[in-house]
Image (cartoon, rainbow, N blue to C red):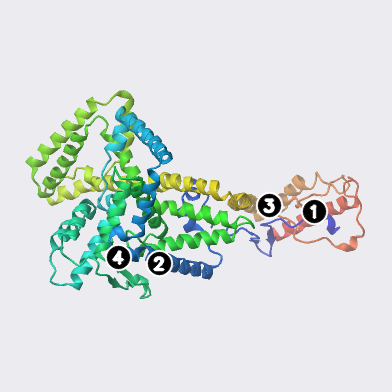
Amino acid sequence: MSQNISNLPQNMPIYSKNQYIQQQYDPNFSAGNTPISTGSSVAQNNPLIKAASTKQENPVKFVAATAASTAALIGINNYINNPLLKNDYDKTVFKNIENFVDRYASTPKAQNITNFFKRIKTAAKNRVNNSEILRTLFRKPSLAGPTAQAQAVGANGHIATRALEVMKKYKEAHPGFTAFDSIIKKAEKESYKYVDEIVNTIKNSGANLKEVMSNRPIWGLGLIKNKSSLQEIINKKTLIDNYKVAGKTLGQKTSGYMMRAVECLTNGMFSGKGAILIQALMIAQSISEASKAEKGEKFSTFMASLTELMAFMATMGIQVRVVNHLAGLKYIGMSPANVEKYRKAIKIANEAAKNGNMHRYQQMTNYIKNLKNAAKANTKWYQKPIKWIGKLVGYGRIKETLKPLKNSKLATSLAKIPYGLKVGLGWAGRVALIMGVVIPIFSGTAKKISYAIFGKPTKTLEREKLKEEQEKQQSQQTNAAPQVNTQNQIQHNNNTTQFQTTQQASQPGNLLNTMNQMKNNTLASQPINQPISASSSLQSPDAGIKRTYIPNPILGPENNINSSTSRSARIDAVLRQADYAEAMAQKYI
């Protein structure tokens, strides 16, 4: 009759001579250690987090792809950069491109296209001029700290930093040369502010501009040769101005943007070769994703991934500028002139706070308060929610936040706590805004453009989506398993408690009465002749006992157990009585 006995349940109590031993048959014993899900919207939309959380199936191939990408990018960088080291701008390929485009731009067809875009630009400018919110958004940006603001400046910030490095190398090669000493000292901390002054100093220094200096940086393990010259700085500043400065010809714009495109590809044109490794890692990541794509979709997968990651590098400065302009919305109602006065007053007040000058500090704080009140009076009711957004995004900016006044040592230390919290929370909030909103917008747009040009890898995307859903379901099942096991454990504990309570209630002096009472409660209502259905759980009359054995097969062939008169049901009742007798005997040994 073994076919009538269900599988042994999990957490079954097995009776030994003097006690019950709880055996754990728990396949999910370690289910509490569930993996962290990377399926959140931020992880899925941010290419950096997604790339960092991607497990490489073949690390050796990934490293090889990174090395190959690094070598290729350095080769491209050198090919384009070397002519800029030794030649005047007029003798470079960029000047040839500029001349070619300008010749085309003089044709009537090109002029019609140019005039069309000029009209659009004029209409947009007029729209901005007619709206205080738009004027503030585009023309009154907030100021970040030195590092972030240098990034916000973009290519000019990179070339200024690069110029200081090259000037220092030139001084090392020519120890007696002093023409750069003043500007190096002046621009050391915030070089992006002095980019024009740096370039003019180089031009008028009398140095050998076309002298090529080279070194092998430590990060390159001696394999990479980094070349630079002062002429390189002048040429690249010209190309930056070509696409940044207004009033340039179409040819100049084209040459400037081509240089910008090369920078997006190599990351080595404006800021040196150190950043090339980052781009190489991104290319290797794209190659890895393409290798896993469906047949016929490998190229489109590669391009979508590479475009998404490159968009992050190409828009790093724009990302910071977006935050700066959003934070600048707090200046709604304040004229551009008053914005400059406000920033200058904060700078003076912070210097006074550092020096402990209470009179000057209070004077500036009152002046700042008056500027705020004037801006508040000029703010219309519908502009206030927008202004509040600007205050939230710009919360705790170092250059626009008053420092606590220096006082006694204890008072100053206590005052620095809320100031530090304000600065820290504001910084963390802006980083979260960039990572969770700004980067996904740029990268997502770039990916859509790639889909439009190179096609959408539909099969690959559907397979990845199905895999994510399966992992999510598996994670949910894993989290639910401990709850089921906990319920089984609670049920067993209740049964064990009932058994122990019965044992404690039985006193040696009335053993016979106790056994008779238990017999009347459990067995008197279940005589052998009474029709009994076989129990699916095969529990004994005592709820604390479960069968842990298979009945003797000598009892003969089995009949239909659904019938109330089946032989199986009668045998089951007899075995229940045997279980009960054994349990009662063992209780009182």
Q: Quadrant of the N terminus?
A: bottom right
Disc 2 from disc 3: Cα separation: 96 Å
Which residue reaches farthest bottom?
222
User: Which residue is tagged 4?
Assistant: 85
Pair 4/3: label in front:
4
Disc 1 from disc 4: Cα separation: 97 Å
Q: In this orientation, does residue 32 appear?
A: no
Disc 4 from disc 3: Cα separation: 108 Å
Task: Name the quadrant containing residue 128.
Answer: top left
User: Which residue is tagged 2?
Assistant: 74
User: Which residue is tagged 1?
Assistant: 576
Q: Residues within 10 Å of mark 4 (few under 14, many from 20)?
A: many
User: Which residue is tagged 3?
Assistant: 510
Pair 4/2: label in front:
4
Sequence-first tag of 1 and 3: 3
Image label count:
4
Query: Considering the numbered disc 4 on the image, is that residue within a helix, a strand or a loop?
Result: helix
Q: Position of residue 10 (x, y in %)?
A: 68, 56
Figure check: 79 above or below 411: below
The amino acid on which the numbered mark 3 sits, given as a three-letter code, is: Asn
Pair 1/2: label in front:
2
